[in-house]
Image (cartoon, rainbow, N blue to C red):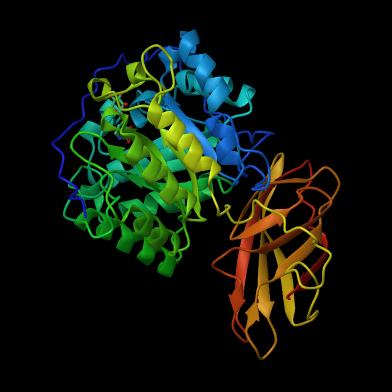
Amino acid sequence: MNEVPARSKRRTVGRARLLAGGVVALVTAVASVAMATLAHADLSGPPGTTLKAAAERSGRYFGAAMGGDRLNDSGFLTIANREFDMMTAVNEMKPDATQPNRGQFDFRAGDAIYNWATQRGMKVRGHTLAWHAQQPRFWGSLNGSALRTAMIDHINGVMGHYRGKLYAWDVVNEAFAENGSRRSSNLQSTGNDWIEAAFRAARAADPGVQLCYNDYNIENRTYGKTQGVYHMIKDFKARGVPIDCVGLQTHFTGGSSLPGNFQQTLSSFAALGVDVALTEVDVTNASSSQYQGLTQACMNVPRCVGITTWGVRDSDSWRGNENPLLFDRNSNPKAAYTSVLNALNAASTTVPGTSTPSGSTSPSTPNDPGQPGVCTATYRSAGSWGGGFQGEVTVSNNGSTTLNGWTVRMTLAGGQTIVNVWNGANTGSTGTVSVRNAAYNGSLGANASTSFGFLANGSTSTAPGDISCTSP
Ligand code: XIL
């Protein structure tokens, strides 16, 4: 098993800061379009000839990070448009960029990347809201409850602007030390509950976006830091703190390399009931075997939803001297590109909820009514705003034996469209839709209940009609 060496401190903020002038007002309007669901999986289709096409076969995405300066770089843009279906801003959505001065939000640089990506059908991961680095300068003069309040205000301001528009947010970035204890930082000094406070605020600010914890050196399951993050997520799940995903940065640069237990690490996180994603991949000298191995590990874990490389060409990399990316400085794909493409095409698992069982009218499929009346579904509104609403459906087992799988059907009012479902997987997003259990909440003991949530756009928040539940 490979060791994961501790890395030396490596944060430099050497980039141009945005000008503080031209403050952009906080916009809280709900976006009319949100694209939080992943591609429809179809493993029987032909192999993909681009990274995104190959990833989409299994309901996954393939992403890259881009800086605002790349918006004028046609070499970058050509590859990005052809190969990727998810984008992350390298620096432009970080706290110092989005709130340069207290109460003055500036989304111009983040929006430019968001607009470029979404106009080309890509989804966007937001990165990041609370982090010890790249903080607004004014956070440096705050501490205790004043800093905590500033962090929550920041989450509300930035998530309000992007509400309903992003696939995921890295709510908290890099909060653990190498030994698995909390990293000391000004945010940590506001109290150990700062991470859960951030996640609770995040859920309220944008109920439809995936909320992720993101970190580096958490790729080796037995490593102290990995264990620290694992136990935090387990605890959050046990206590109902909202968290949907873990981002493993997967920087196999700066002295780190692919550990032999990487797939087990991914599946152990997934078993806690969260999605996993590789969020900032780069590999020293673009080792084909490491790229192949990390991709295959993700493909083997159903809840590993996608891979993002931290840049496109070596010339885009924050560690360019290690030549760690899939394209060289002349925009040519490297050998590692082919090994990643092949591993994506060889995926044998699909992301839960992205594939429709074939022959779905057969009585043996989970979508068919089996024991009507044994499970029931009850709707409640969890909030509404101009242009959208959030619903929660409680699914209960009224029988005396354990149910294995459930499907809720409901009919949305005209003009309503579901944009995201959590703790369940939907088929259809308008009219009569069905939502079946997620991988981790299908088993319901006698008299037990669970719930799923959804976010919908629509001019009315009328409750869905004809709600029913069936189990196989
Ligand atoms: C890096 C950027 O690539 C650099 O441009 C910037 O100077 C520092 O931050 N982990 C993260 C990313 O979560 O935000 C970091 O990005 C790389 C490490």
Q: Is residue 327 or residue 266 the one in the foreground?
A: 327
Q: Work out whether residue 215 can be spotted.
A: yes
| On-image quarter of the N terminus | bottom left
Q: Work out whether residue 163 can be spotted.
A: no
Most distant residue in the bottom direction = 400
Q: At 45% from the left edge and 31% from the top edge, which residue is drawn?
A: 338
Q: Is residue 95 or residue 49 the one in the foreground?
A: 49
User: How far from the left and from the top, in percent, is residue 460?
Assistant: 79, 46
Asked where in the image residue 450 lies, by quadrant, the reply is bottom right
Q: At 62% from the left edge and 87% from the top edge, which residue is drawn?
A: 446
User: How far from the left and from the top, in percent, is residue 296?
Assistant: 44, 47
* Residue 57 vertical placement versus 70 (above, below): below
Q: Is residue 167 left or right of residue 98?
A: right
Q: At 55% from the left edge and 40% from the top edge, which residue is drawn?
A: 55
Q: Is residue 191 or residue 394 the one in the foreground?
A: 394
User: How far from the left and from the top, in percent, is residue 469?
Assistant: 76, 71
User: How far from the left and from the top, in percent, is residue 169?
Assistant: 46, 41
Q: Is residue 433 or residue 162 the one in the foreground?
A: 433
* Residue 432 vertical placement versus 119 (above, below): below
Asked where in the image residue 433 lies, by quadrant, the reply is bottom right
Q: At 53% from the left edge and 46% from the top edge, which residue is drawn?
A: 346
Q: How many numbered markers are drawn?
A: 0
* Residue 322 vertical placement versus 397 (above, below): above
Q: Is residue 381 left or right of residue 297?
A: right
| On-image quarter of the C terminus | bottom right
* Residue 159 vertical placement versus 137 (above, below): below
Q: Quadrant of ligand 1?
A: top left
